[in-house]
Image (cartoon, grey):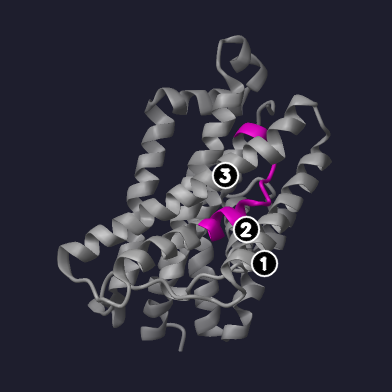
Amino acid sequence: MCFTQNFSNAIVLGLADGFIYALIALGYTLVYGVLQLINFAHSEVFMSGGFAGYFILNAIIGTRQPHGAASFGLVVLGILGGAAGGGLIAFILERVAYRPLRKRNAPKLAFLISAIGASYFLYNLAGKEFGRDSVSIPSPFTNGTVFSVFGAQVQTYYLVIAIAALVMLVLLDRLVAVTRLGKGIRAVAQDAETASLMGVNIDRIISQTFVIGGLLGGAAGFLFGLSSGVVYTMGFTPALKAFTAAVLGGIGNIRGAVLGGLLLGIAENLSVTCIGFQWRDVMAFGILVVVLLVRPTGILGERLGRSA
């Protein structure tokens, strides 16, 4: 039964989920590249983007059903709003939870504890301020089947995710490859001490890297919330799976994060089709364990440097 129409459906769903995981995973990868640390508060960056998109579209759309050009504009506005919310929280996290520790040359464990503390603070703050129940983002478009691929129905929502994610991924790749900021990020990731001696402002680069990761994570939070709704607990599982994707592709490698996200999304949806829904999370986190045991550097490896 795996290799029929259900297989095609699993691929389509897997790619949609995979693009979400890839956007979140890039936040882990970018921060790890410049700090050699995992930002375990990134799940709340994702959640913040979902709520930011919700408040913006809820205020504009209300109970109306947009169509045509209005739908396109509202999707873009929601993505930008989610990105702005995620970027703001990421900026604050770097300033409050990470920079003071770097100034004091704190041990790695202190960064981990600080990130977990910040995560729980934001998690509970959102629950207190926004309520404990899930709320639905007003849909900026009418979802329906656009076309079929080998019997699998490709819906408007899947296309929105794919197009938005591809645009953001291409922009990030070009930013890192050709811009002055990108060169600074690569220099700090390769050797922070030498980059500092060459005149690179380490603090600025790290802060901007956090913001870029936050922009992507916040946009992913909005896209995820369009289908699943937003709630203060929404970041936990997707962020863990995105971390798995980053490790799978090779944490510290931008294209590896994208590859890992897509492979993970497809793998867990195939497990649902071929084995059963209850195996979805088992497959995702089983992949993390296997990768760490067999190839800890991931598929595309990792470029190690001196941390900032």
Q: Secondary structure at mark 1?
A: helix
All told, the count of numbered labels is 3
Does residue 221 sit above or below 86 in this rendering? below
Q: Which mark is nearer the camera, 3 or 2?
A: 3
Q: Which residue of the protein is positioned furthest toward the bottom in this rendering?
A: 1
Q: Dot 2: within a 10 Å radius of its alpha carbon, few (fewer than 14), some, or many (20 or more) residues?
A: many
Classify the position of the C terminus by image quarter.
Answer: top right
Name the amino acid type tagged 3. Ala
The magenta region covers: 34-48
**Whole-number angstrom distance, CA of label 2 to CA of label 1:** 7 Å
Q: Position of residue 186 (x, y in %)?
A: 52, 27
Residue 244 marker:
2
Residue 285 marker:
1
One can see residue 258 in this view: no
Instruction: Report the residue marked by disc 3.
Output: 90
Residue 36 marker:
none
- Residue shown at 37%/55% (left/top)? 79
- Residue shown at 82%/40% (left/top)? 110
Does residue 104 sit above or below 265 in this rendering? above
Q: Position of residue 232 (x, y in %)?
A: 60, 67
- Asked if the residue under mark 2 is in contact with the one under mark 3, i.e. CB atoms within 8 Å, the reply is no
80 left or right, relative to 195: left
Q: Quadrant of residue 251?
A: top right
Name the amino acid type tagged 1. Phe
Between discs 2 and 1, the one toward the N terminus: 2
- Asked if the residue under mark 1 is in contact with the one under mark 2, i.e. CB atoms within 8 Å, the reply is yes
Q: Secondary structure at mark 2?
A: helix
Between discs 3 and 2, the one toward the N terminus: 3
**Whole-number angstrom distance, CA of label 3 to CA of label 1:** 25 Å
